[in-house]
Image: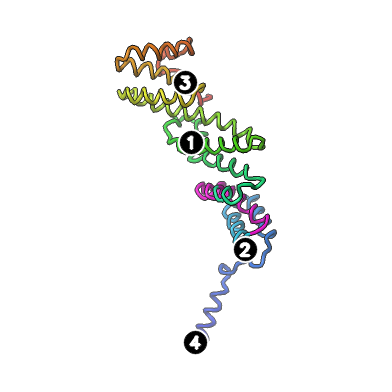
Amino acid sequence: MTMVLAVALATGCSLLPEQIDMTAGWSASKLYSEAKSAMNDNNWEEAVKYFQKLESRYPYGRYAQQAQMEVAYAHWKEGDSASALAACDRFIKLHPNHPHVDYMYYLKGLITFNGDLGFMGYLNTQDQTERDPKSARESFDTFKELVQRFPNSKYTPDAIQRLNYLVNALAAHEVHVARYYLKRGAYVASANRSQYAIKQYPNTPAQEEALFILVAAYDKMGMEALRADAERVMRLNYPNSVYYTQGLEKKKPWWQVF
């Protein structure tokens, strides 16, 4: 009697609702449809589960490839950037000639563009150049590859705009570091970072301040010839610079609209 009861209890436990896979026997199209429905409801976690089941049960065919793309987006929307990036890289590696692989490059660029608020955070009052620019550099590299490999992609125009933004942001970061060193008396380091910003990011809004910091750093070090040369270049390019009268306490940073 005791054994029969134990068997009955074990059988009952195995049939608990939470242990029953309601998707068992679903077709690939059914799983995909349910995953898309979950995405439409912003239920990203549920969508990821359906896409993963789809790929696991039906690893070949158009639904599997589409699931690999969609799951990257769903991971991103649910806030799991690491898994989203891994999904993008996996798809690019497995399907380098897929007709929509350009989208995966674009999505990868977006993920790192907004990583940890990324450089979009420039629109708030915090000095975002203090952030680690690692995500911005990764985003820049990805968008650059997209533009070079797929010049006719529908995602390329937006990628170019983001590239321009990222160049300005990365230049501003270098100038922020140069300014930081200057204020703390690390003049050699300040001059080096200014020179790097000038050479790596020409024609950006940060160039003006980079040149001014370079002049100031050379002046502090008593390098009169280098100072004169840097000032000549600055006055040639920025004859009416506000830095001449206001110094480093000038207008608002380039990213602050208000």
User: Where does label 4 land, which residue?
Assistant: 3
Instruction: Report helix, strand or loop for mark 3.
Output: helix
In this rendering, the answer to whether 15 lies above or below 108 is below
Where disc 4 sits, the SS reads helix
Query: Residue 225, how many percent across, how many down?
Result: 34, 12
Say which of 159 and 94 sits in front: 94
Name which of mark 4 and mark 3 comes first in the sequence. 4
Give the alpha-carbon distance from disc 1 to disc 4, as whole Å: 65 Å
User: Answer yes or no: do the residues labelled 1 and 3 have beta carbons within 8 Å?
Assistant: no
Most frequent secondary structure within the magenta stretch: helix
Q: Secondary structure at mark 2?
A: helix
Q: CA distance from mark 4 to mark 3?
A: 83 Å
Residue at numbered disc 3: 207
Q: Mark 2 Cα within 10 Å, few/some/many (few <14, many 20+)?
A: some
Query: Residue 212, position in %: x, y?
Result: 41, 17
Q: Are marks 2 and 4 in contact (CB under 8 Å)?
A: no
Q: How is the image coloured?
A: rainbow
The residue carrying mark 2 is 57
Give the mark, 1 or 3, whose residue is nearer the N terminus.
Answer: 1
Mark seen at residue 137: 1
- Specify start and end residues of the magenta stretch as a single range: 60-88
Please state which of the two labelled residues, at mark 4 or mark 3, is closer to the viewer. Answer: 3
CA distance for labels 1 and 3: 19 Å
Q: Tell me which numbered mark, 2 or 1, is placed earlier along the sequence.
A: 2
Labels 1 and 4 touching (C-beta < 8 A): no
